[in-house]
Image (spheres, grey):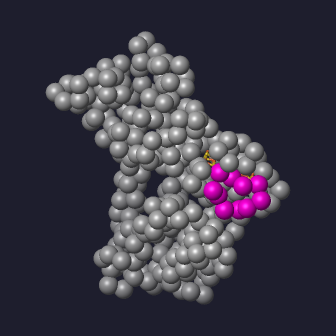
């Protein structure tokens, strides 16, 4: 087996999908994003906060990085329960939120073990993974700017790795341009379903700055008149993905690792004293266990909004 075949065999045994490419693709993707920014296709503030944060090969602890490895790990949605009074409230954590960072480390360590016999190393890559995955043929874009893989739909977490493993450039040339799902040419289901106007019926690029997901993940206040398109999601939004025909029957739900009882929910909502309260300590410990990237204040604000929408609190 050559190196790429070793990676593919490793991915297959775990139910993952993988693609391998040259590190030179990083510069191509970086330049393509900058051109879009300069052409005004990507809004300046969104670019600065979400796309200008990538470090690419800077700081990668490899002497001679040669290849990039993109791994798609199937990801379920998680049901996260709270109790308010005598009501049990089930909220949804869309795929990839729970354990997001841990997944990166787990996949890296696992692949490093599989490659250890060959002497090659793998390290984490901080780069626009969806764009890289698209160029490598691992995924196609949907009109909603989400990545899709046949058989997984859009329900997977991408993990980007960089390696000193040589890459045979001839074996898998990258796509020269971004590719859209063939179904999207005629379909406009997601554009019709998105109430924020983030998905353009004609333009392929998402108006990401209008997407509710962005607001829900930010610590900045969510405009009062902006309603969540997926009222059960405690963060993010699944509306366009759930309605997409490419995703039919593919979303799995699992219970989150923890749930919050009535006292813990009160503490979560900041309705009990923050310090010295046992319920607060329990709530905080459970929150940590979820492995979420966004902090407790974001989830507290979102849970309050969700409970108001459902008429549970005023
Ligand atoms: S709903 Fe239709 S247009 Fe939107 S991503 Fe899915 S297939 Fe494409
Ligand atoms: S995630 Fe929600 S707000 Fe964002 S594009 Fe899809 S439907 Fe619209």
Left or right: residue 109 versus residue 202 is left
Instruction: Find residue 177 and report its horizontal and vertical position in percent.
Output: 67, 76
Left or right: residue 263 versus residue 17 is left
Which residue is at 23% across, 29% downward?
A: 274
In the figure, 29 relative to 299: above or below? below
Instruction: Find residue 294 and report its horizontal and vertical position in percent.
Output: 39, 47
* Residue 134 picture quarter: bottom right
Left or right: residue 243 versus residue 185 is left
Instruction: Find residue 91 and report its horizontal and vertical position in percent.
Output: 50, 31
Residue 94 showing in the rendered view:
no
* Residue 296 picture quarter: top left
Which residue is at 66% across, 80% downward?
A: 176
* Residue 168 picture quarter: bottom right
Residue 126 lies in the magenta stretch: no
Outermost residue toward the left in this view: 276
Magenta range is: 198-207
Instruction: Find residue 207 and report its horizontal and vertical position in percent.
Output: 63, 56
Residue 291 showing in the rendered view:
yes
Left or right: residue 302 versus residue 63 is right
Most prominent secondary structure in the magenta stretch?
A: loop
Residue 202 lies in the magenta stretch: yes
Outermost residue toward the top in this view: 86
In the figure, 139 relative to 310: above or below? below
Which residue is at 42% across, 18% downward?
A: 84
Which residue is at 45% across, 68% downward?
A: 52
**Camera-nearest residue between 49 and 14:** 49
């Amino acid at each position: 087996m050559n190196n790429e075949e070793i990676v593919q065999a490793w991915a297959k045994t775990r139910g993952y999908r993988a693609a391998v490419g040259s590190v030179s693709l990083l510069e191509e993707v970086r330049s393509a994003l900058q051109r879009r920014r300069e052409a005004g296709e990507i809004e300046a503030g969104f670019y600065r906060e979400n796309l200008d944060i990538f470090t690419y090969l800077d700081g990668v602890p490899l002497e001679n990085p040669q290849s990039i490895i993109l791994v798609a790990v199937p990801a379920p949605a998680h049901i996260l329960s709270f109790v308010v009074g005598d009501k049990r409230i089930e909220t949804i954590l869309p795929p990839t939120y729970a354990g997001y960072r841990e997944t990166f480390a787990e996949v890296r360590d696992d692949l490093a073990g599989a490659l250890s016999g060959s002497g090659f190393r793998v390290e984490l890559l901080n780069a626009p993974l969806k764009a890289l995955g698209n160029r490598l043929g691992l995924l196609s874009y949907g009109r909603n700017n989400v990545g899709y893989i046949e058989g997984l739909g859009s329900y997977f977490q991408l993990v980007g790795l960089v390696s000193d493993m040589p890459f045979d450039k001839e074996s898998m040339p990258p796509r020269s341009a971004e590719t859209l799902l063939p179904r999207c040419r005629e379909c406009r289901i997601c554009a019709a379903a998105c109430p924020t106007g983030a998905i353009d019926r004609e333009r392929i690029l998402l108006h990401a700055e209008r997407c509710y997901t962005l607001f829900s993940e930010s610590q900045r206040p969510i405009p009062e008149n902006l309603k969540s398109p997926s009222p059960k999601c405690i963060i993010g939004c699944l509306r366009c993905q759930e309605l997409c025909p490419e995703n039919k029957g593919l979303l799995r739900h699992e219970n989150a690792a923890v749930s919050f009882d009535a006292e813990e929910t009160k503490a979560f909502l900041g309705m009990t004293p923050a310090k010295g309260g046992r319920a607060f300590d329990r709530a905080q410990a459970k929150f940590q266990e979820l492995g979420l990237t966004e902090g407790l204040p974001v989830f507290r604000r979102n849970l309050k909004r969700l409970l108001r929408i459902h008429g549970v609190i005023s």
